[in-house]
Amino acid sequence: MEKALLGKTDLEVTKIGLGAWQFGEPAWGWGTTHSEKEAIEIIHQALDLGINWIDTAEVYGNGISEEVVAKALKHRRKEVVIATKVSGAHLRPVDIQKALEGSLRRLKTDYIDLYQIHWPSYYVPLRDTMATLSEWVNVGHIRYVGVSNFPVSLLKEAAEAFAPKKIITHQVRYNLLQREIEREILPYCRQTGIDIIAYSPLAQGVLTGKYDSHLKIQKGPWGSLRLFANEGNFHQAKGVLEVMQKIAMERGVEPAQVALRWLIQKEGVVAIPGAKSIQQLITNVGAFGWSLSQEETEWLDTASAHLSLTAYALSED
């Protein structure tokens, strides 16, 4: 199982973790994806397969995801790196304290390995937020701090406010079809030793190859919120999918494994795909144990380099 030391610290994680946002999904009103029993089974199987970290957040199902993770890890806490996130609405010092105490209570642990700011706030000074997080690191309830969805300007500001401690990760959307972080965020993070945690590494399922038209995506659980429900966007994605499928066929692997492999071969990048089933989990882990050649990587890079995606899929007609 391939591992990485996040932010050049002693926090060692597998290059693929388990994203746990779906374990809290019913509270968002999008329909039930997992029963609690199914979610716990997926977490246990992930650990048995060698995955050693789980990413969740206080907002996932209004805390349900953290509670499910805690139940799954009841006798296995020491095996697992827990990453969770504080809401961007809870970044005042007093709110951070309440949020952190809530996450610790729901996760049934006295420390969080990686505590991340889920979204930046434009109303709370970052110096206050980072000073408060530093205090909680000092008392041992947080081991390391990361951020999520920050532009480079705010990432720099947060890093300066947190010094001499170090922000070790930046969690952002990153996949073969959505490579916008490569313009500024990825170069800056590499320069400063901040590792990227790639969420939506399979572009909400598009990179699994299971959709053969934008109409099928429109009928999915998120309908028009899916970027690739737009016909023009999906048409562009098909070119990338065709290259992925060719490589997958020649390799004897799944398209999703090609997409994940493209990510985790990159310097300073780890990925957190979700899993709706044990089979999806097994597929994700199948991205380990082999490598894309330089030529295959270049094919994928070229196919996905010049996508121009419409911001939103506005119609389900």
Image (cartoon, rainbow, N blue to C red):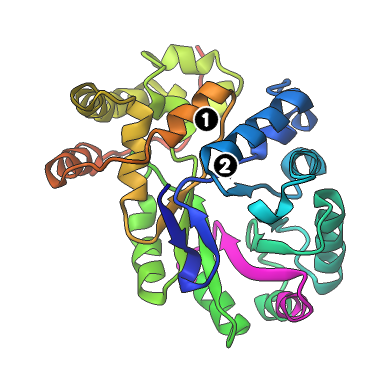
Which residue is drawn at the image coordinates 40% and 56% (left, top)? Answer: 269
Judge whether residue 147 can be spotted in this image.
Answer: yes
Of label 2 and label 1, which has the lower sequence position? 2
Q: In the image, 67: left or right of 129? A: right
Along the line of sight, which residue is nearer the eye, 89 or 259?
259
256 sits to left or right of 82: left
Q: Which residue is tagged 1?
A: 281
Q: Residue at x 86, y 71 (%)?
A: 94
Q: What's the CA distance linking mark 2 and mark 1? A: 9 Å
Q: Are marks 2 and 1 in contact (CB under 8 Å)?
A: yes
Q: Position of residue 121 (x, y in %)?
A: 67, 64
Residue at left offset 44%, top offset 50%: 15
Q: Quadrant of residue 35?
A: top right
Placement of 121 over or under 80, stated as above or below: below
User: For the residue marked with disc 1, what is the amino acid?
Assistant: Leu
Q: Dot 1 lies on which element? A: helix
Q: Residues within 10 Å of mark 1 (few under 14, many from 20)?
A: many
Where does label 2 land, which residue?
Answer: 18
Q: Circle 2 sits in a helix, a strand or a loop, which is it? A: strand
Horizontal and vertical percent position of residue 19: 59, 41
Q: Which residues are magenta?
A: 132-154
